[in-house]
Image: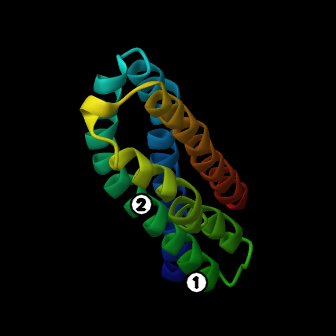
Amino acid sequence: MPWDSLLNAGMGKLALILAALFTGGALYITFVEQPARLLLDDENLLRQWRPSYKRGFTMQASLAFIAGLAGLAAAWQMDDWRWAIGALLMLANWPYTLTIIMPVNSRLNAIAPKEAGSQTRELIKYWGKLHVIRGLFGICAILAYAVLL
């Protein structure tokens, strides 16, 4: 296998690995962390959500961006536009998060923990439903990348 082919396949594998890491994080939040936090009372529910969101944002935003860039690099290096499908699915997390999830995040961050109540709980439940879409973007990107490898 020539070095160029090895490098190109490597970029595709990197895109797949990063998409899988992103998706694993998103699925963990959906199926483990969110149900566990919903067992807390309203005030502690909000107190738990805040630092979790801050830490998760950095990790997931970075992984989505780098997995998307790696997919675009694989498309360019291998001269195969199909890699861009997975890349666009990963990068779609950014506009989705900024336009759909961020307004909910802002509303939650505006609530003082002592003022948390049933509306806070419902908002966090809604946030969890919105977060499921991020996991779906990741699953679809993994499938798009995996098919090409």
Q: Tell me, yes or no, if residue 113 can be seen here.
A: yes
SS of the residue under disc 2: helix
Q: How many marks?
A: 2
Which residue position is annotated with label 1? Answer: 77
In the image, 144 versus 93, the foreground residue is 93
Q: Dot 2, how many residues are within 10 Å of its Cα: few (below 14), some (14-19), or many (20+)?
A: some
Using the rendered view, name the quadrant where residue 42 is placed: top left
Residue 136: x and y, percent?
A: 65, 46
In the image, 127 versus 4, the foreground residue is 127
SS of the residue under disc 1: helix
Q: Quadrant of the C terminus?
A: bottom right
Farthest residue in the front direction? 115
Q: Dot 1, how many residues are within 10 Å of its Cα: few (below 14), some (14-19), or many (20+)?
A: some
Look at 41% across and 19% down and name the residue there.
36
Residue 25, labelled with which disc?
Answer: none
Residue 35: x and y, percent?
A: 48, 21
Which residue position is annotated with label 2? Answer: 61
